[in-house]
Image (spheres, helix red, strand yellow):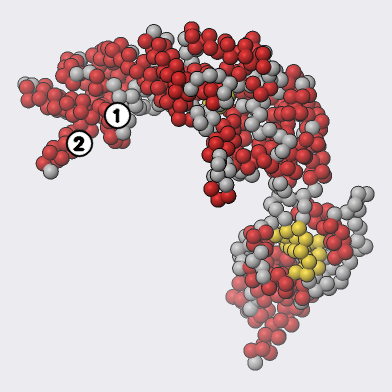
């Protein structure tokens, strides 16, 4: 009985749909003779097979098309199977089999799909008054099932984004297979994740009769991307270096046309920053473009990061020194930069035509600072004018310059050391890194220990003579010369690393001592603020949203006797007291007495004890006035100390 009733419902719904067809009209597309757009060039294996597949009626199997992300699978398929010959369905986000069928129905019969929604929407209201829909129980699943019975296999079904469906693989392939076996469709399925297709197993054999792996059509894609460049000079640069760009891209073994598009767009950005003298130097551009492409692809594909870009020059030498005398499993793992470099036998990825700073700005931060790029190019052998740059810049380019020019720069560098004329930290580090390199390579006599001693004497002489800049008050004061300076990473070989570290450490310590040499004047200034301008004291010694807060994270107050500090504080006008209170409270908040300002912990406790003694000694309103400005952070510190003493 239930089966008979179901047949009645199905038959009745079918009559309704036929009536709707008469009202709405036939399907949207008129199916006429197939019109293939054939190329004059030889067709690809994908194109050849799909054109054959298009001629089959009820083939009984689907075609699986695989390939890497961004390889242009969808684009290539749509070029072969024209719009009037296909139904395209994306499986992205599909959560149920019914939803998958609804998506097919929506593209195969869009007008009827719209009518189905109207019927579904009206079914609830109809049920309340009785009638057809109340009788039939026209649920979306039943209603769509009736419509699916009327879908004709007059076009090829294309299912894209297989791996992005939320359905179980078994369910989604089963639903797709129903269109092959039950409805006689030609079906093409695109899968971007080859790891997923490897898990198909027997499901693949049941559904797919042919698997085709797509290769990206880079030549066609290049022409398309080139045509999207509007800047004349940029377009000419890309066009003139077409072969070099494609050669580098192919060497990368990356098959994503999306990455190729980004590379072309980035070349457009780069060209817009260059000067005419740069563009006109064909030798420089022939070197620049493939270097740019290779490193761009490597970073975009996630194979190189900032750290790898900043250590280009020393990585190979370091690896070979670690690997010396070792074989087989004993060999250390090759650094990512070396692996990348081996992919491009015709491109020197260590080339300093693009400095480390320029590379990180462009490929890591997405910024193309013209000044940094210009300096990088101008400091290269193609544009370098030795008489206009510091000697170390000439020496670091020894690969590309004549020996007599480099040797002359080495002599000038030695003169700088003798005269103690270089005072900028980055320049000093470059000079002594190159000295270590020359000793390591046997270019100069001596030992690395001797170079370290020479550097230490150099820094000590600068400080003793008042010529070494003290550390700045910015907590990031090391950043301008950390790992690189003036766009160039330090040339530090693996063997030289521990020696360079000693020079680095002494430089940092010397600049901190140079700062301490200035402490008497700084403390005198701060005490004057406590005495007469406590608001400025607050801004100088604690972190705020206003002002520069130069000494907020620098331990220095412990150089002031606690008694003197408290006496100056309490001798100042009463209106000053509260600002000093806020300064201390804010300075030591967030646990800074246990971190940045730990050197001041004993001093802070002594200030608390002095204030408490002043409360005991005071008379009248002065006593509660003092007690009310004792910072809470100092009270908490005292409580912790007392608790520790009781343990």
Whether residue 334 is situated above or below residue 377 in the rendered picture:
below
* Cβ atoms under marks 1 and 2 closer than 8 Å: no
333 on left or right of 15: left
For the point 23% across and 33% down, the residue is 633
| Residue indicated by mark 1 | 597
526 on left or right of 25: left
Please report whichever mark, 1 or 2, sits nearer to the chain's N-terminal start: 1
Q: Position of residue 641 (x, y in %)?
A: 16, 36
Query: Callout 2: helix, strand or loop?
Result: helix
Q: Can you tell which mark lies on residue 636?
A: 2
> In the figure, residue 165 lies in which quadrant?
bottom right
462 on left or right of 264: left
Q: Position of residue 441 (x, y in %)?
A: 57, 25
Query: Callout 1: helix, strand or loop?
Result: loop
Observer-nearest of 15 and 177 = 177
Q: Can you tell which of label 1 and label 2 is closer to the viewer? A: 1
Crowd band around label 2 with a 10 angstrom C-alpha radius: few (<14), some (14–19), many (20+): few
> In the figure, residue 17 lies in which quadrant?
bottom right
Observer-nearest of 70 and 127 = 70
Q: Position of residue 374 (x, y in %)?
A: 66, 21
246 on left or right of 557: right
Whether residue 479 is situated above or below residue 407 in the rendered picture:
below
For the point 62% across and 11% down, the residue is 408
For the question of whether residue 228 can be seen, the reply is no
Whether residue 49 is situated above or below residue 148 in the rendered picture:
above
Alpha-carbon span between mark 1 and mark 2: 16 Å
> In the figure, residue 565 lies in which quadrant?
top left
């Amino acid at each position: 009985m239930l089966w008979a009733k179901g047949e009645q419902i199905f038959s009745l719904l079918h009559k309704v749909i036929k009536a709707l067809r008469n009202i709405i009209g036939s399907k949207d597309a008129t199916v006429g003779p197939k019109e293939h757009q054939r190329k004059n060039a030889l067709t690809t294996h994908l194109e050849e097979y799909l054109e054959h597949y298009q001629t089959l009626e009820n083939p009984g199997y689907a075609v699986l098309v695989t390939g890497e992300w961004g390889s242009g699978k969808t684009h290539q398929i749509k070029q072969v199977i024209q719009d009037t010959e296909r139904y395209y369905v994306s499986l992205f986000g599909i959560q149920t089999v019914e939803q998958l069928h609804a998506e097919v129905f929506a593209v195969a019969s869009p007008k009827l799909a719209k009518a189905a929604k109207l019927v579904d929407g009206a079914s609830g209201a109809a049920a309340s008054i009785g009638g057809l829909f109340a009788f039939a129980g026209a649920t979306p699943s039943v209603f769509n099932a009736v419509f699916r019975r009327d879908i004709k296999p007059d076009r090829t079904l294309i299912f894209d984004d297989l791996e992005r469906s939320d359905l179980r693989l078994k369910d989604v392939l089963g639903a797709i297979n129903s269109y092959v076996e039950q409805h006689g469709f030609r079906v093409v399925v695109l899968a971007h994740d080859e790891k997923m297709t490897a898990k198909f197993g027997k499901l693949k054999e049941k559904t797919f009769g042919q698997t085709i792996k797509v290769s990206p059509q880079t030549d066609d894609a290049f022409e398309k991307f080139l045509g999207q460049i509007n800047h004349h000079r940029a377009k000419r640069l890309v066009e003139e270096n077409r072969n070099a760009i494609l050669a580098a891209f192919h060497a990368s073994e990356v098959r994503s046309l999306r990455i190729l598009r980004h590379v072309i767009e980035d070349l457009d950005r780069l060209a817009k920053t260059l000067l005419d003298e740069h563009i006109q130097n064909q030798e420089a551009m022939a070197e620049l473009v493939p270097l740019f492409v290779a490193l761009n692809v490597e970073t975009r594909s996630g194979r190189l990061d900032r750290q790898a870009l900043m250590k280009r020059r020393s990585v190979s030498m370091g690896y070979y020194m670690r690997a010396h005398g070792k074989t087989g499993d004993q060999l250390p793992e090759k650094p990512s930069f070396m692996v990348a470099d081996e992919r491009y036998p015709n491109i020197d990825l260590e080339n300093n035509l693009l400095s480390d700073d320029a590379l990180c700005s462009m490929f890591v931060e997405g910024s193309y600072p013209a000044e940094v790029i210009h300096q990088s190019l101008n400091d290269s052998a193609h544009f370098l004018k030795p008489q206009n740059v510091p000697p170390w810049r000439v020496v670091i380019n020894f690969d590309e310059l004549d020996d007599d020019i480099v040797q002359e720069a080495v002599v000038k560098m030695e003169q700088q050391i003798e005269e103690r004329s270089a005072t900028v930290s980055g320049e000093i580090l470059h000079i002594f890194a190159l000295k270590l390199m020359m000793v390591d390579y046997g270019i100069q006599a001596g030992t690395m220990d001797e170079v370290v001693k020479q550097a230490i004497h150099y820094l000590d002489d600068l400080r003793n003579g008042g010529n070494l800049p003290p550390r700045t008050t910015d907590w990031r004061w090391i950043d301008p010369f950390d790992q690189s300076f003036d766009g160039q990473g330090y040339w530090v070989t693996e063997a030289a690393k521990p020696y360079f570290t000693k020079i680095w450490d002494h430089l940092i310590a010397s600049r901190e001592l140079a700062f301490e040499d200035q402490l008497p004047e700084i403390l005198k200034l701060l005490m004057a603020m406590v005495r007469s301008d406590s608001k400025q004291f607050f801004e100088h010694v604690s972190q705020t949203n206003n002002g520069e807060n130069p000494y907020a994270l620098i331990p220095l107050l412990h150089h002031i006797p606690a008694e003197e500090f408290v006496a100056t504080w309490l001798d100042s006008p009463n209106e000053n007291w509260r600002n000093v209170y806020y300064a201390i409270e804010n300075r030591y908040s967030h646990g800074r007495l246990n971190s940045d300002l730990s050197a001041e912990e004993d001093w802070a406790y002594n200030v608390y004890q002095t204030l408490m003694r002043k409360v005991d000694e005071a008379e009248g309103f002065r006593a509660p006035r003092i007690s009310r400005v004792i910072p809470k952070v100092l009270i908490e510190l005292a409580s912790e100390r007392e608790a520790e003493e009781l343990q």
